[in-house]
């Protein structure tokens, strides 16, 4: 704007008027001033500099008037003048007659055109000058925050994770700067939720539980930051909003399975219930109902089933045994996998493993690895020479699987003996092929039985096979002992049971049971004299009082064989050397006078054996022959090449009680012939005779295979492999002790661990503001791993902060903290004695409007 100068001054001459007119003007063509909104009448604006007109002299009698000529349509302002010395000040104030007030939110700037008029002493107008005054309306905290909407509602599930955002409230304030910055807080204290003071986001600070509270109603308060500095012009009224949070029930918990089971089950027993199962679900309503409990693993053959007790909603079930359990078919027992499912949405399930242990009963017969063992022994074999290991297995376990062997037939001269525990057959005397070249030995197995077992206890099971078909393949069993024994056999299954309670002190301690068989194939020498017994056949009639008699049906046209009708003894009735055939089949039967048994054949191979035999290997029985009816002697090449000047006898005399070593009489090599077990025996001292007795000591790995050469009489080597820096001869065994130590305190197992942090917050944040969330972890299980949070005693007494013991949420409980630094100690505690503390430093800053709070990690 430009100042205008008139050309006809009323109160000076022409020369002086020209000078005055050129000097009559405002000091600046444009002025900037400000005034607060809502100012009362006669409130003067605040200029940035001096406004007005400089006079020619201090005693000038010129009267200057100011008036607003434009820019004030609402007539809010009035211009005044005040002369001080040689300067006439322009003053602008609010009018007192206005009903309305200045409102920055409605209009924040006025551009006023002010005109100055100079009047002379004679009352005539003089010079005129114009200037522009820009009035800026300053904001005052005259408005309160306003929520829109004023009611909020949402639904969340009860499994919502902690610190998850739920909803956001929003309020607006048209004021500027600090006056327009809004803080949100709750009207009442709550541990369940927290609201961010700046963003208005409501988060979850404790787990929701539908059963405890289904609806949460909160009141959120919005205040601006200018409330602390509000003048008396306005009053502070906080704006509120109602927040309704509904909790929707969900399937929060999986079913829990509790099993009360028997320690074990005796195999083949009639037990019908193995375990009682209880299933609970901590949810309520349909979510807590159990839909099913099933066996989903560990029972492929379906030996078990689950049956509810008292209805499906009772939560109790029985695990029942459907079929007889056989330990031998499930050596490791069963490991049942139970799965429980509820009816909730989403459906939850849990698993439980239930081991089933089977107790063994002696229901299996020891079995030889072969029915016939054929072995050659040179007649030069020294005494105690290992001949063959008789391998016997028993599917039972423990004591029921212990088998002891003895020779019960064919060893009349005591030429052999067997190690009852290892099954190794040894020579007991020096053999002579010219005297006896063939031995048929019958070993016998022993079965152990505890005394005082009830009558009917299963002892062993006898199994026989018949290659015939139809009725000819039917097998019945009987005990053929002449003397009465306290045992009986099931004629169809072959299971031997006790007939009475056995007593170790008053009864025999060993019983030898004989079992019968009918179908036989064997060899009969032609030289046997007339009347020699070949075999005894036997039949059983289950009818009471019936007498069984035996007869030959066919196969005996020449009458060379006779069958005693009462005893069933088949004997020779002629000179067998006169029979041209090499094979004879005698068909026999039995009758009770009314019914006849099926015909059973007796196969005999007639061999041309002689009493004084040489070397006739062609007359030896075939490997396919299952049985030999009577002991026979056959010749073989027993004369092996002999070494010159070789010791006449090399043998292990003593020390091999487990039958694991054998010595080659020709080379002197000592070999392993059995499996070594260091836990059974760590050292063997063998007494070996070579001309004279000498003692040899050696060690061998328990994993050595059969046939491993472990010692030779002529050389040894004490070194073992590459010794590197260790010297086995100097020290063979080193015992190392290793100690493991954790980092726990003296009185704790595993204290909770977490790091320190520094949090910076404003000084004017509202009460209940979440300023930090601490989190501690504890690797302990159960109650020892549950962590609770609390403040140290010193911080608790000061009352500045509060920490939620469940979630670790730390809140401010006193507003308007002074600027400075506070150190709060938050302690995490589990079921063990307290562990370490975590320090959180709070740096209270001035309200500079930068952020709400920040976290500096100072983890140690």
Image (cartoon, rainbow, N blue to C red):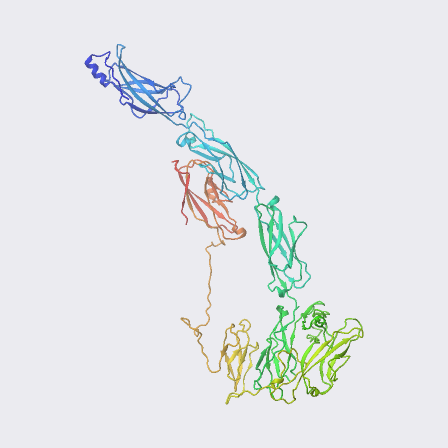
Image: 824 above or below 537: above
Query: How many numbered marks does the figure carry?
Result: 0
- Whether residue 760 is visible, yes or no, is no
Q: Residue furthest left?
A: 15
Which quarter shows the N terminus? top left
Q: Find residue 663 and report its horizontal and vertical position in percent.
A: 53, 81
Q: Residue furthest top?
A: 122
Q: Find residue 484 and report its horizontal and vertical position in percent.
A: 74, 75
Looking at the image, residue 30 sits to the left or right of residue 98; the answer is left
Looking at the image, residue 659 sits to the left or right of residue 497; the answer is left
Looking at the image, residue 189 sits to the left or right of residue 112; the answer is right
Image: 122 above or below 697: above
Looking at the picture, tell me which residue is in the foreground, 846 or 385: 385
Looking at the picture, tell me which residue is in the foreground, 732 or 122: 122
Image: 737 above or below 579: above
Q: Find residue 54 and report its horizontal and vertical position in percent.
A: 25, 20
> In which image quadrant can residue 819 be found?
top left
- Whether residue 815 is visible, yes or no, is yes
> In which image quadrant can residue 372 be found?
bottom right
Looking at the picture, tell me which residue is in the foreground, 128 or 546: 546
Image: 235 above or below 97: below
């Amino acid at each position: 704007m430009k100042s205008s100068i008139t050309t006809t001054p009323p109160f000076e001459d022409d020369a002086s008027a020209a000078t005055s007119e050129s000097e009559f003007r405002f000091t600046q063509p444009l002025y900037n001033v400000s005034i607060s909104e809502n100012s009362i009448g006669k409130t003067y604006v605040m200029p940035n500099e001096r406004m007005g007109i400089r006079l020619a002299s201090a005693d000038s009698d010129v009267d200057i008037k100011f008036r607003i000529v434009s820019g004030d349509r609402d007539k809010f302002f009035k211009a005044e003048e005040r002369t001080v010395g040689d300067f006439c000040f322009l003053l602008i104030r609010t009018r007192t007659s206005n009903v309305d007030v200045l409102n920055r939110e409605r209009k924040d700037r006025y551009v006023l055109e002010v005109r100055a008029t100079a009047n002379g002493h004679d009352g005539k107008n003089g010079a005129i000058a114009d200037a522009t005054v820009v009035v800026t309306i300053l904001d005052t905290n005259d408005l309160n925050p306003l929520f829109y909407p004023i009611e909020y509602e949402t639904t969340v599930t009860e499994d919502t994770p902690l610190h998850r955002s739920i909803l956001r409230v929003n309020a607006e304030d048209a004021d500027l700067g600090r006056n327009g910055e809004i803080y949100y807080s709750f009207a009442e204290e709550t541990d369940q939720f927290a609201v961010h003071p700046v963003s208005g986001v409501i988060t979850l600070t404790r787990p929701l539980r539908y059963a405890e509270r289904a609806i949460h109603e909160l009141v959120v308060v919005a205040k601006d930051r200018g409330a602390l500095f509000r003048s008396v012009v306005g009053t502070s009224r906080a704006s509120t909003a109602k927040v309704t949070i509904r909790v929707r029930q969900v399937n929060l918990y999986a079913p829990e399975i509790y099993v009360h089971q028997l320690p074990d089950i005796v195999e083949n027993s009639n037990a019908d219930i193995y375990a009682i199962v209880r299933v609970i679900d901590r949810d309520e309503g349909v979510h807590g109902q159990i839909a099913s409990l099933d066996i989903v693993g560990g029972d492929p053959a379906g030996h078990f089933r689950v049956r509810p007790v008292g209805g499906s909603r009772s939560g109790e079930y029985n695990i029942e045994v459907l079929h007889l359990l056989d330990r031998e078919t499930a050596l490791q027992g069963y490991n049942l996998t139970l799965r429980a499912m509820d009816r909730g949405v989403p459906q939850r399930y849990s698993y439980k493993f239930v081991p089933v242990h089977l107790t063994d009963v002696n229901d299996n017969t020891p079995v030889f690895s072969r029915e016939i063992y054929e072995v050659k022994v040179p007649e030069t074999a020294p005494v105690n020479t290992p001949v063959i290991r008789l391998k016997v297995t028993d599917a039972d376990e423990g004591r029921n699987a212990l088998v002891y062997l003895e020779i019960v037939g064919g060893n009349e001269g005591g030429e052999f003996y067997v190690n009852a525990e290892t099954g190794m057959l040894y020579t007991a005397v020096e053999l002579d092929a010219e005297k006896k070249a063939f031995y048929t030995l019958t070993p016998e197995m022993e079965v152990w039985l505890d005394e005082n077992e009830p009558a009917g206890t299963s002892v062993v099971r006898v199994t026989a096979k018949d290659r015939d078909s139809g009725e000819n393949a039917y097998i019945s069993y009987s005990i053929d002992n002449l003397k009465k024994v306290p045992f009986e056999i099931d004629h169809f299954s072959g299971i031997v049971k006790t007939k009475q309670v056995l007593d170790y002190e008053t009864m025999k301690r060993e019983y030898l049971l004989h079992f019968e068989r009918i179908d036989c194939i064997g060899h009969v020498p032609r030289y046997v004299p007339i009347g020699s017994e070949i075999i005894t056949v036997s039949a059983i009639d289950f009818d009471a009082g019936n007498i069984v008699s035996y007869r030959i049906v066919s196969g005996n046209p020449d009458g060379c064989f006779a069958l005693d009708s009462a005893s069933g003894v088949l004997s020779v009735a002629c000179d067998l050397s006169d029979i041209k055939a090499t094979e004879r089949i005698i068909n026999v039967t039995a009758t009770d006078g009314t019914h006849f048994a099926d015909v059973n054949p007796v196969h005999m191979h007639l061999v041309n054996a002689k009493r004084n035999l040489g070397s006739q290997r062609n007359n030896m029985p075939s490997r396919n022959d299952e049985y030999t009816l009577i002991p026979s002697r056959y010749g073989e090449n027993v004369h092996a090449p002999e070494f010159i000047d070789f010791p006449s006898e090399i043998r292990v005399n003593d020390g091999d009680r487990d039958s694991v070593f054998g010595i080659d009489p020709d080379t002197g090599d000592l070999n392993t012939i059995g499996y070594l077990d260091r836990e059974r025996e760590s050292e063997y001292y063998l007494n070996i005779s070579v001309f004279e007795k000498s003692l040899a000591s050696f060690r061998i790995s328990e994993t050595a295979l059969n046939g491993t050469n472990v010692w030779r009489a002529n050389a040894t080597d004490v070194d073992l492999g590459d010794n590197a820096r260790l010297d086995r001869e100097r020290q063979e065994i080193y015992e190392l002790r290793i100690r493991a130590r954790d980092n726990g305190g003296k009185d704790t197992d595993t204290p909770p661990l977490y790091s320190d942090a520094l949090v910076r917050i404003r000084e004017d944040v509202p009460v209940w503001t979440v300023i930090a969330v601490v989190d501690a972890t504890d690797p302990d299980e159960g109650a020892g791993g549950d962590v609770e949070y609390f403040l140290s005693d010193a911080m608790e007494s000061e009352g500045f902060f509060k920490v939620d013991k469940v979630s670790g949420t730390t809140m401010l409980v006193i507003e308007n903290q002074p600027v400075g630094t506070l150190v709060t100690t938050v302690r995490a505690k589990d079921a063990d004695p307290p562990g370490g503390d975590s320090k959180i430093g709070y740096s209270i800053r001035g309200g500079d409007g930068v952020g709400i709070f920040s976290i500096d990690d100072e983890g140690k």
